[in-house]
Image (tube, grey):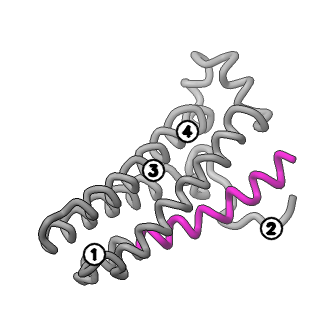
Amino acid sequence: MYSAVLLLHSWIRWIALVAGVGTTLAALRGKTDGERSLADRWGLVMMMTLDLQMLIGLVLYLVLSPNMQEIFNHFGASMKDPALRFWAVEHITAMMGAVILAHAARVLARKAKIAAAKRTRLIICAGLATVLMLAGMPWPGRPGGRDLFRFSL
């Protein structure tokens, strides 16, 4: 079960990342006019995939991961290991921040009275969410790093 859920989590991250980049680029290009603008559609996809990622990630983190229970049991020692610290603190903190910023981007953009404010809010919030996604991903070569693409259970 763990491998299947991890595989799903691994592939959905690419949709979330593409949506984050898409939202940011659409806002930078000024595609923010109207309620169904290109930036709004990308932003909705980003928010939905990040919410799904968070749900799957929490199931992995709290229920299925064989490593997290050991990390929790020996938290002080785990903080001295860069790979374990990445999973226990850095990954979940960055991703929770990205989820919060994705929601903030949607709310602040929808409440903006003028197009320039909407554009600015989307650039800042979606851009920061994308940066946090990039920082929190387990890139190969980093402590806690994994393969870019999982193909098997």
The mark closer to the camera, 1 or 4, is: 1
Above or below — where is 5 with respect to 27?
above
SS of the residue under disc 3:
helix
Residue 127 on the magenta span? no
Residue 54 at what x, y percent from top left?
58, 48
- To which residue does mark 2 refer? 151
Q: Amino acid at mark 4?
A: Phe
For image coordinates 78% across by 37% down, the residue present is 64
Residue 92 at what x, y percent from top left?
53, 40
Rounded to the nearest angstrom, the CA distance separating label 2 from label 4 is 23 Å
Of the numbered discs 4 and 3, the one sitting upstream in the chain is: 4
For image coordinates 47% across by 56% down, the residue present is 133
Of the numbered discs 1 and 4, the one sitting upstream in the chain is: 1
- To which residue does mark 1 refer? 27
Q: Main secondary structure of the magenta part?
A: helix
- To which residue does mark 4 refer? 86
